Amino acid sequence: MSDRSGLEQILEAAWGVRDQRTKRRQRGLSLELIVNAAVHIAATEDLSAVSMTRVAGDLGVSPMSLYRYVQAKGELLILMADAICGTPPEPAEPDAGWRAGLSEWAWGMHRLLREHPWVLRIPITGPPATPNQVAWLERALASLAGTPLSETEKLSVTMLVNGYVRSEALLFSDVTAAFAGSDSVYEAMSFYSRMLSKLASPEQFPAVHAALSVGGYEEEGGPDDEFVFGLERVLDGIERLVERRSASADS
């Protein structure tokens, strides 16, 4: 089976169109139950704890029973990622403009990844193609509908914002895990700042010392401060692009 045909079958399962009439189903078992059980394991333990054997054990069935619904663990992971996405929330103000719409979209994705950080460990197999992921893509593109951007640029903008949200979530998850034994991430970063000030000479690293001297790593703020700063700068850049396209269209 080629990778392409395997992915096609996975997507058919995600969209509920896979023909499984020849497969004997087990009473009391369904694809939704299997995916939900796997999500529960990932949420309460870790993604590494998810296996076909473990999911089967939690459901009280044999591992072979699962293969009537899911081809392999890789397929299960893709279905898990789609399940936790859910459908994107409706815009609070549909006519608020592209920037407000895209910002709201980014915050929705941000909250989702903070709530389910394990999903960041699932390998990306391609562009959004499962039902809920496509719904999120639709929402982002719809927020850009009134702009002069080309359809290709709208896709690129969506990828840019999504990339920033995902990257920030992954960094936050890694830092939180690294400092899990500390009283708080702030305390850990404060300790890091003090140690770096002692170990790295100002002559060799003047720019680093300049940042540390004003408490660059020690300022305690809200947990989303860095996300807000980065998102606003990304949106500023997109706004400049929209302005340039508008000016070109008017000239």
Image (cartoon, rainbow, N blue to C red):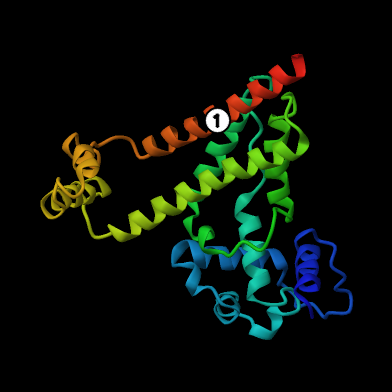
- Neighbour class for label 1 at 10 Å: few (<14), some, many (≥20)? few
Q: Is residue 242 left or right of residue 171?
A: right
Extreme left residue here? 198
Q: Position of residue 96 (x, y in %)?
A: 64, 20
Judging depth in this view, the residue of 176 and 127 nearest the camera is 127
Q: Is residue 100 visible?
A: no
Q: Is residue 80 left or right of residue 141?
A: left
Up the image or down, 187 lies above or below 14; here it is: above
| Mark 1 residue element | helix
Judging depth in this view, the residue of 118 and 210 nearest the camera is 210
The quarter in which the N terminus is drawn is: bottom right
- Quadrant of the rendered image containing residue 72: bottom right
Up the image or down, 179 lies above or below 112; here it is: below
Up the image or down, 13 lies above or below 99; here it is: below
Q: Position of residue 148 (x, y in %)?
A: 74, 25
Q: Is residue 25 left or right of residue 215?
A: right
Up the image or down, 25 lies above or below 96; here it is: below
Residue in the image at 67% along x and 37% along y: 140
Q: Position of residue 180 (x, y in %)?
A: 28, 59
- Report how many numbered discs are placed on residues in the image: 1
Residue in the image at 89% along x and 74% along y: 21
Find disc 1 in the rendering and name its residue: 237
The quarter in which the C terminus is drawn is: top right
Q: Position of residue 11 (x, y in %)?
A: 77, 63
Q: Is residue 32 visible?
A: yes
What amino acid is at disc 1?
Gly
Extreme top residue here? 250
Residue in the image at 59% along x and 30% along y: 238
Residue in the image at 60% along x and 75% along y: 59
